[in-house]
Image (cartoon, grey):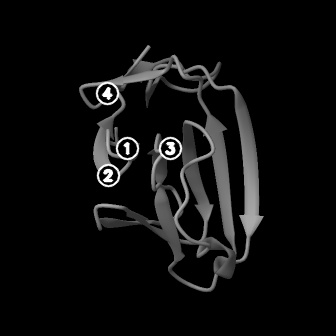
Amino acid sequence: MIISHIYVDEHGESHFADLELPESIMPSAPGLPDMLSTPSMEATSLRLISTKPEAMARGWHPAPGRQFSLMLKGSVAVEVSDGEIRQFAPGSVLFFEDVWGKGHLNHAIDTDDILLGFVAVPDHTIVVDGEIAR
């Protein structure tokens, strides 16, 4: 599975990269067939945020911690400091790792309320060659 990843370089500038989460056929739950799944990753917390679209445009900011963002409702464009902008609609997953430096800028795409899920991951969950290693 390929998801978007925001990281920061040694100068504090943020960039997008594609991050590959390895998948394999695994058991899912009793009574269900095996499904394509990523390996389990350690998480430290889950937070759900509901907001109006106008709250998204509040200036450049780094992520508060290393986290996955799950776009559940609404659509957002995210800009990194090198000028690239990517759009995220419901069902999108983004991994934020720009915890220092200039950070990123959010833009609401439409007038729908926004619902996001944030799954924080510990610092020892590392990215190696564009893949999350355990």
Q: Residues within 10 Å of mark 4 (few under 14, many from 20)?
A: some
Q: Amino acid at mark 3?
A: Trp
Secondary structure at badge 2 equals strand
CA gap, disc 1 and disc 3: 7 Å
- Residue on which disc 2 sits: 15
Instruction: Please name the residue that numbered disc 1 is placed on.
Output: 8
Q: Could you say where residue 2 lies in the image, as x and y percent from the top left?
A: 32, 42
Marks 1 and 3, the one that precedes in the sequence: 1
* Residue 122 place in picture, x, y as percent: 59, 23
Badge 1 or badge 2: first in the primary sequence? 1
Q: CA distance from mark 3 to mark 2?
A: 12 Å
- Dot 3 corresponds to which residue? 100
- Depth-wise, is mark 2 or mark 4 nearer the camera? 2
Q: How far apart are the alpha carbons under marks 1 and 2?
A: 6 Å
Check the picture and name the quadrant holding the N terminus.
Answer: top left
Camera-near label (1 vs 4) is 1
Label 1 close to label 2 by CB (< 8 Å) = yes
Is the residue marked by circle 2 packed among few (<14), some (14-19), or many (20+) residues within 10 Å? many
